[in-house]
Amino acid sequence: MSRRADSRSVRSPGASAPGLRRAVTRSTDSEETTMQADEMQVHQENRHDHRRLGRELDLFDTDPLMGAGLPYWLPDGAAVRHALEEYVRGVERRAGYQHVYSPVLGKRELYEISGHWSHYSEDMFPPMDLGAEQVVLRPSLCPHHALIYRSRSHSYRELPLRMAELGGMYRSELSGVLGGLTRVRAIQLNDAHIFCTLDQVAEEARSALELIRRAYADLGIRPSLFRLSLPGPGGKYVAAPEMWRRATALLTEVLDGAGVEYRAVEGEAAFYGPKIDVQITDGAGREATLSTVQVDFHQPEQFDLHYIGPDGAKHRPVMVHRSIIGSVERAVAHLIETHGGAFPAWLAPVQLEVLPVSDDELPAAAELLDRCLDLGLRARLAAPEQGTLGARVRAARLVPYQAVIGPREAAVGHVSLRLRDGHRPPPLPTLDALARITAQVEARSSEL
Ligand SMILES: [Zn+2]
């Protein structure tokens, strides 16, 4: 991932006609600070502001003692995050990725070699002195993955080698720009690096873009722009014109082949190479990068990576950096706003609310709850002591399925389902109802 992966363009909310939209690329911290007041106002007008919903729905919060830009996840938010992370890992496993874990700290020398120290240090936390050495909170996962690749010898037969990790990284943002889950100092990144031959780069980048498009369909996310992010004047870019030309040609080929409309924008590249960025727009009209595909000839050189070719000689691999959902924080923020808290059943913190009409149905309700938990469904029981049936139904209005159990249902082992969309099928045998719900959840259906 690059320093620019989280850079954002802001569209003036006042100019709604497409031709009149003013695109402002934010490039410095001071610009971002001066746009704060404007941004706050826009957020307050946004009914689906993820910060407001996050608090109201008990998804996440912050504490001044933990610090600004360091949100914590409450149980319901953690359930959404867990479902999303498992989804991404599953997609990656099926696409031939292997998962690793690597530490969030690294020695300063590691980032000097990768180029982060000279190109990116203003976004890094200051190094910590440990005796004779200095360690830093990592600003990206790439150098760790390059070292993991380098730790074993590789034959051309192993390529493309796809290494993935949902791992922590850190960004020293100014406290004035921090907020919610979109501007944070601790980031959990859905990252991967594909080590491959030059001939394999275009196909790997194409497949990565395809994974992103499929994930967006599953998650209900609509991309607002595919962007070819190129270097601009004055940026701190690695100087290697031939390398930039080749990488840009490859990504252009991928975008043209994918048949998507895209816009080439200067000044948005990573310091080591150009990238494809998939942009999203929030409810207030502000644009951000969620997903990215990057071609990198630089870090394989820096880390002296190689593979043994069919000729028995050493060859240099290329690194494709890609992220399907970007940072988990930004992805969840966007999902909260996109769905207004009414998540698809497979992502919902609580998928089924069990509602006994009176205390007499409590044993049947408890039994249903146990069955749900055994099936891996996230279910919750709202007992009559919590209020009238109407009040409990209203309190659970964002839950995809409600299972009402009255005396008639309890007597014959049935439930009356109430779907979030208002649909109320006739009472069903409990097992049939659960089979229906489980099928929808496993299919990751957007329907209930
Ligand atoms: Zn990377």
Image (cartoon, grey):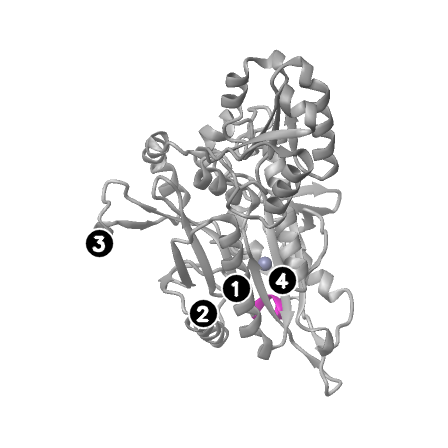
Identify which amino acid the numbered label 3 is placed on: Gly
Element under disc 4: strand
Q: Which mark is residue 193?
A: 4
Beta carbon at label 4 within 8 Å of ligand 1:
yes
What is the spatial separation of the Cα atoms under label 2 and label 4, in whole angstroms? 21 Å
Q: Which mark is residue 19?
A: 3
What is the magenta segment's predominant secondary structure?
helix
Beta carbon at label 2 within 8 Å of ligand 1:
no
Query: On the rendered image, what quadrant is the N terminus found in?
Result: bottom right
Q: Residues within 10 Å of mark 3 (few under 14, many from 20)?
A: few
Q: Nearer the viewer, residue 296 or 62?
A: 62
What is the spatial separation of the Cα atoms under label 3 and label 4, in whole angstroms? 38 Å
- Give the mark nearest the N terminus, 3 or 4: 3
Q: Height in image: 326 above or below 231?
A: above
The answer to whether residue 256 is seen in the rendering is: yes
Looking at the image, is mark 4 or mark 1 nearer the viewer? 1
**Residue at (41% x, 72% y) in the render:** 256
Q: Which residue is mark 1?
A: 210
What is the spatial separation of the Cα atoms under label 2 and label 1, in whole angstroms? 8 Å
Instruction: Give residue 401's position: percent from left, percent from top.
Output: 56, 33
Circles 3 and 4 in contact, beta carbons < 8 Å: no
Q: Residues within 10 Å of mark 1 (few under 14, many from 20)?
A: some
The answer to whether residue 169 is seen in the rendering is: no
Give the magenta range: 297-301
